[in-house]
Image (cartoon, grey):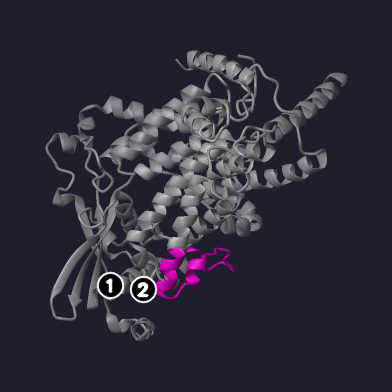
Amino acid sequence: MNLVRGYLSELRREAVAGWNRFWFTPADPATLALVRILAGAMLLYTHLVWTLGLTDFFGRASWVSAEAAALAHGANEARSYVWSYLWLLRSPAALWTAHIAALVVFAMLTLGLFSRVTSVLAYLIAVSYVNRVPGALFGLDQINCMLAMYLMIGPSGAAWSLDRLRAARRARGRLPQAEPSTSANLAIRLVQIQMCVIYFFAGLGKLHGESWWGGDAIWGAVANLEYQSLDMTWLAAWPLTVAVITQVTVYWELFFCAAVWPRLLRPLVLALAIPLHLGIAFCMGMITFGLVMLIGCVSFVPPWLVRQLLSGAAAGCEEEHGAKGMEGLTRKGSRRAGKVASGSSRVKS
Amino acid sequence: MPNQPSNSVAPAGAAPAPMRWSPRVRALVSMLVALHVVALLVGPLSVPDSIMGRFLGRFYRPYLEVAYLNHGYKFFGPDPGPSHLVRYELELADGNRLKGVFPDRGEHWPRLLYHRHFMLSEFIMALSEPGDPRLPWEKQPLSERQRAYSRSYARHLLDKHEANRVTLYFVEHLIPSPQEVLDGMKLDDPGLYRTRKLGTYAADDFDDAVAVAKVAEERQ
């Protein structure tokens, strides 16, 4: 009995400590800042492309009428909670004005200007666009909105941003330290958890299908002319290769949620994401979707490694403003980080 | 490397930063995080329908809809299937006829814009409901939502081209087997396409709200 009580007591203690460590350990906002730059650029590009079909998709007689959209959103339900400010814009002038304002917001978010405000606006704008045109959407929009939502939570402009440069100017050239932030950790953890959920259910959903289990689903993707951007039909003569790619895809998606956490496995799991998503990008013409999934995977790159990778550009930028060395890393810290980086490259190789 | 949380502010070897939020704040945020993480599961559990998805959806639907989180994430599942296009024939005001299709690689560029139009045609398929097994594919009745979207596409095309009448066709493009491709079949072989009519719509079928708005716009 004492054995069980002792076990339960330790389980509770360790679970609480692990939960707190996972969600509430303050983290360097470097990874969040990188996600902001990449996701902001993707949001900007996505909405720049809407510009080419703005009146077709959002205008008075758009592809998706109010009646059709209401049915798609489930008008049979007692009440719909789907919202979009774009329904309120009746004239072309108002639509174009709002659209240009949206593009400015996404550009500001990418550059990290007033990022606390622009991250909230970017989320509201992104969700408004997708809720206006149900039927013209795909995975890109889901991931765009997910990233925009979590960027609202943390200080995404605390590194590599115009906000940072403005802070440096106010401090007369000396940058204040970018302090570890609990909300930065929280935001990144939420992205990570949602990526795990997405991959797990993407893998689980595939097991409903005969072709993913049978091993020829990838053929169905590469032989689809409407998706095709690179002719891969030579794979018809290589059924075993098709089966291997098919089943690696399923198992990678299913086990991502477990395999991405151990430190030594993480580089391998993330490395596999690159051919998977670039394959979707370049063989199936879904470049934006492939890239936005990789942006979600960036959330798993630890901040110190992000700084190592981006240190050249950032150090050059900040030294111009009189700052010495990398923010958040003292000289001692830099030496230490250097050692760690060489250690991590050994792990990765 | 020592065992550090991978998201740690510090490189391996350094102690993680101490907690900054008070236990009370952490407890409150923990509760919200737990509710949110459960919410993330509701969309995927509901597609396809499940008892657990239905049960959780009763509480979570408002949150999922407001936050745009009601997704199944079943990318390319359960099976990559045939693709779908919409072909249209317009009778223009000057008596000429105009034919087109969406998506159209020649017209819709860049690729993301092409994909938006591709999703429009695919959505007609996504809106289908279980049909009558006694009827062939071409004769299956359209669902209410398919009819609404078909009508919406027609209205857009009539307005854009200032046409009097439009007929829409739904085209399914089947995928050849590897053996068929090895035997020389092309992906655009005519035998891989089958077509059904969605409907014929006249400009007069639509209420005159569009015309009224147009006149008002011209006056401005």
Residue at 63%, 46% in the rendered image? A153
**Residue at disc 2, secondary structure:** loop
Residue at 43%, 26% in the rendered image? A271
Give percent across and percent down for residue A302: 56, 28
Residue at 64%, 53% in the rendered image? B55
B139, B195: nearer the viewer: B195
Q: Which residue is mark 2?
A: A61
In the image, residue B128 above or below residue A149: below
Name the residue type under label 1.
Lys
Whether residue B155 appears in magenta in the rendering, the answer is no
Q: Which residue is mark 1?
A: B160
**Image quarter of the C terminus of chain A:** top left
Magenta residues span A72-99
Left or right: A243 as drawn, with respect to B50: left
* Chain of the residue under the numbered disc 2 shown in the image: A
**Residue at disc 1, secondary structure:** helix
Circles 1, 2 touching at the beta carbon (< 8 Å):
yes
Give percent across and percent down for residue B77: 41, 43
In the image, residue B157 above or below residue A177: below
Question: Can you see residue B76?
Answer: no
B198, A278: nearer the viewer: A278
Name the residue type under label 2.
Ala
Quarter holding residue B168: bottom left
A153, B34: nearer the viewer: A153
For label 2, the crowd category at 10 Å Cα-Cα, with few meaning under 14, some 14 to 19 and many 20 or more, is many
**Image quarter of the N terminus of chain A:** top right
Left or right: A156 as drawn, with respect to B87: right
Whether residue A97 appears in magenta in the rendering, the answer is yes
* Chain of the residue under the numbered disc 1 shown in the image: B
